Amino acid sequence: MANSKRKCKNCGERVREYVVVNNMAFCNWESVVQWSHGNRHKGAEITRKEQRKSDTARKKALMTRSDWYKKLTTEINRWIVHVRDKGKPCYTCGKTDPSVKYDCGHRHHAGRGGGDRRRFIEENLHKQCSMSCNQHGSGMPVEYDLALDREYGAGFADKLKCIDNYPTLKEQFPTHHDIELEVLRYRKLNKEAANKSNN
């Protein structure tokens, strides 16, 4: 004769006396309730994950070029301040005070006089003191130009000033996907740097 013990669906114990619900064996009714409660939440969690995935895909499909540029700006600014220029002084005043907040300062700002072309050009972006240089000092253009010529060679500031030396954003990033790839590239660089500093 076959073994009359059955395995409880909830706890996994083999029991001789059991309760059968939907062709599944349980130790007792309390076990049935525990199993159904846990199973219900598990199903809800899967549904929530699927919903989040669907929402993310929908949001991504609705994003405009402007939205993608904002994401790219966030990632590249973080990379400039916290990775590339980490430990370096302010580009325009040389301050290295750890209590000072630093920004990613643009020599030519997006939207000003065609500055959009240079918006994501790394030579146009450097770490600056947030208040004294970048905001209250309006980016310190004279000091910025001197620092550019020191770092990249005489005449570089004038080259950067001429917008015709740089492709338009549509030429740099023909599709939304191209911008997304650049966002992912900088996000990866930021994550790798964060992981190194944590180890």
Image (cartoon, rainbow, N blue to C red):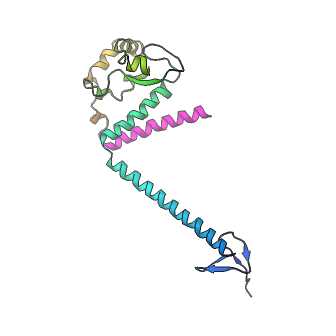
Q: Farthest residue in the bottom direction?
A: 1
Q: Residue at x 43, y 57 (%)?
A: 51
Q: Residue at x 51, y 62 (%)?
A: 44
Residue 115 in magenta stretch: no
Magenta-tinted stretch:
174-199
Foreground pick, 142 / 168: 142
Q: Quadrant of the N terminus?
A: bottom right
Residue 123 x/y as whole percent: 38, 23
Question: What count of labels does the image hold?
Answer: 0
Foreground pick, 40 / 152: 40
The image quadrant of residue 199 is top right
Establish if 63 lies above or below 118.
below
Q: Is residue 197 left or right of residue 55?
A: right
Magenta-drawn stretch, dominant element (helix, strand or loop):
helix
Residue 79 x/y as whole percent: 46, 30
The image quadrant of residue 148 is top left
The image quadrant of residue 156 is top left
Residue 175 x/y as whole percent: 30, 42
Residue 118 x/y as whole percent: 32, 26
Foreground pick, 199 / 39: 39
Establish if 83 lies above or below 61.
above
Establish if 178 lies above or below 153.
below
Foreground pick, 84 / 4: 4
Q: Residue at x 66, y 71 (%)?
A: 31
Q: Is residue 195 left or right of residue 173?
A: right
